[in-house]
Image: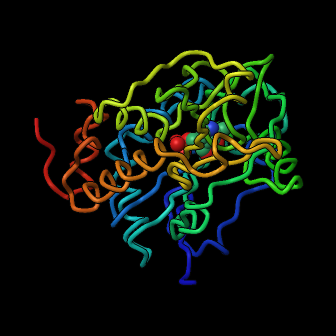
Amino acid sequence: MSEQIAYLNGEYLRLEDARVPVLDRGFIFGDGVYEVIPVYAGKPLRLAAHLQRLARSLAAIKLPNPHTDEEWAQLLAELVKRHPWADQSIYLHITRGVAPRNHAFPAVTKPTVFMMSGPLKLPSAEERSAGVRTLSLEDFRWQRCDIKSIALLGNCLLRQAAVEAGCKEAVLFRDGWLTEGAASNIFVIENGTLLAPPIDHLILPGITYEITLELAHQHGMPVKVAPISEAQTRQADELWLTSSTNEVLAITELDGHPVGSGRPGPAWRQMSEWFEAFKRDLRSGAEGVASAGVTRAGAPVEAALAGTPAAG
Ligand SMILES: Cc1ncc(COP(=O)(O)O)c(C=O)c1O
């Protein structure tokens, strides 16, 4: 693999040379937030939405955003340019920085800003056409799963339990209600309707979740965003998981039982086609539904990445 370059506090350096002090609050407390941004043909997917979610996570942990959206766009464009792959996966991580160990925040904060990028590794064609196995587990994480926190021990324990059971992902329930996966959002197909759990403090507002709902709306697939019970999930015609690095995958097994026919279903096949078309538009620069999520505030960001002057 070609050499990976990291960005750390204003410098670009070889990933293996990047170092942070042991008193960094990210290391000591997991005090920080992150983003994962997929890049197709050199273009970050829904950058404005990712930066908006980053700003929300930072505000939720009372950490001032170290950069404007325009600065982020430039830093990210530079990082992408330093790697040879057309399709990449950017990892962006901000902590509250270095301070004597004390739970309360330091009076003066100099955040640590770290980014790296690698080739985007999507599921293989075989995995997509076979679908994936999942294991149901009680969602024992904290009550702020809407924050994209770097403290992911709960998610790691849940994913590990799934992997040890021979599964790709955990499907999480809290008090009998579907929340999400260990690192994905979960959708249900019931009688031709796409059901999604509402975005609240118990799930991460996934960018792929948002795109999936938009594509369904755009193509006229019935959609209902409402709490989904465990019983509904277990009786689903289809289950899907979505994330930036998995796109939309069919879940064909839950706890050893087939989901629907036990094969990826017709609604999933449709959504996959729509998602492929959406990516083709993104690669070619025709934004399609990609532009729907770009707010006025986000517009200059997209323009900065495209290397064109911001309009308006
Ligand atoms: C807990 C959790 N939920 C949902 C997602 C999906 O979010 P996105 O579609 O933005 O990748 C992730 C992504 O890593 C996640 O960690």
Percent from the top left, x then y, of residue 228? 64, 20
Residue sitting at x 60%, y 34% = 237
- Marker count (numbered): 0
Quadrant (top left, top right, bottom left, bottom right) of the C terminus? top left
Q: Is residue 59 visible?
A: yes
State ligand 1's quadrant: top right
Quadrant (top left, top right, bottom left, bottom right) of the N terminus? bottom right
Q: Is residue 98 above or below residue 139?
A: below
Who is closer to the viewer here, 237 or 311?
237
Colour scheme of this structure image? rainbow
Residue sitting at x 41%, y 59% = 39
- Name the residue at the left extreme: 312
Percent from the top left, x then y, of residue 126? 59, 68
Does residue 85 appear to the left or right of 278 in the view shown?
right
Q: Is residue 262 above or below residue 238?
A: below
Residue sitting at x 65%, y 67% = 18
Who is closer to the viewer here, 141 or 103?
141
Does residue 249 appear to the left or right of 73 in the view shown?
right
Percent from the top left, x then y, of residue 11? 50, 64
Does residue 284 appear to the left or right of 63 in the view shown?
left
Q: Is residue 111 visible?
A: no
Q: Is residue 63 above or below residue 282?
A: above
- The image quadrant of residue 75 is bottom left
- The image quadrant of residue 186 is top right
- Name the residue at the front extreme: 261
